Amino acid sequence: MSRIGKRPIEIPGKVSIKIDGQHIAVKGPKGDLERILPELVQVTQEGNAIQVIRQDDSRPARERHGLARTLVANMVEGVSKGYEKRLQIQGVGYRAQVQGKTLVLNVGYSHPVEIEPPDGIEFAIVDKKTNEIAVTGISKEEVGNTAARIRAVRPPEVYKGKGIRYKGEFIQRKAGKAGKK
């Protein structure tokens, strides 16, 4: 039995869940999410807890058991608390700003890079001095993918450390060329 899959998911007070076969819809104070779960697992609601049960002990069912439970748990947490990922920009002259909903990055290219947020995702500049960007939303998957797209515009380089990195991410620095003696 999967250690993750067998744990029940507690439902907070303001969250409602609708289960229709493999389709699950979660509605909460921050918004609502829907997802179709894999065929080999079944979701049941008992009081204020959700249990994910696999149909048999086949390998594909065991593989999807913990995955399905984590997906449902992330949906419940997203509609009740939401998710946030922070990025930092380092480099002389590198900066970010939000114009309307669009994130505009000036990171050493000849033109500014504009990133449109997907539905349900918002950008905010947390600190102008440290150039810290916050990506927030209710879907953990969308928040992570959007943050990765922003980081991919100018990934941190290993010699000077310039670029866009996740907050708290450590970049192993390399020594430059050894000079002539």
Image: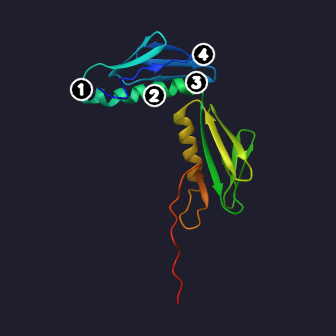
| Element at label 3 | helix
Give the Cα distance between marks 1 and 3: 32 Å
- Quick one: label 1 or label 3, which is nearer the N terminus? 1
- Quick one: label 2 or label 4, which is nearer the N terminus? 4
Q: Nearer the viewer, mark 4 or mark 3?
A: 4
Q: State the residue at coordinates (58%, 62%).
A: 161
Task: Give the amino acid at mark 1.
Answer: Ser
Identify residue for label 2.
Answer: 71
- Quick one: label 4 or label 1, which is nearer the N terminus? 4
The spot of residue 172 in percent (x, y) is 50, 61
Q: State the residue at coordinates (71%, 54%).
A: 95
- Quick one: label 1 or label 2, which is nearer the N terminus? 1
- Quick one: label 4 or label 3, which is nearer the N terminus? 4
| Element at label 1 | loop
The circle on residue 79 is: 3
Residue farthest toward the bottom in the current orientation of the protein = 181
- Quarter containing the N terminus: top left
| Element at label 2 | helix
Residues at badges 1 and 2 in contact (C-beta under 8 Å)?
no
Identify residue for label 4.
Answer: 14
Task: Give the amino acid at mark 4.
Answer: Lys
Identify residue for label 1.
Answer: 58
Q: State the residue at coordinates (63%, 24%).
A: 30
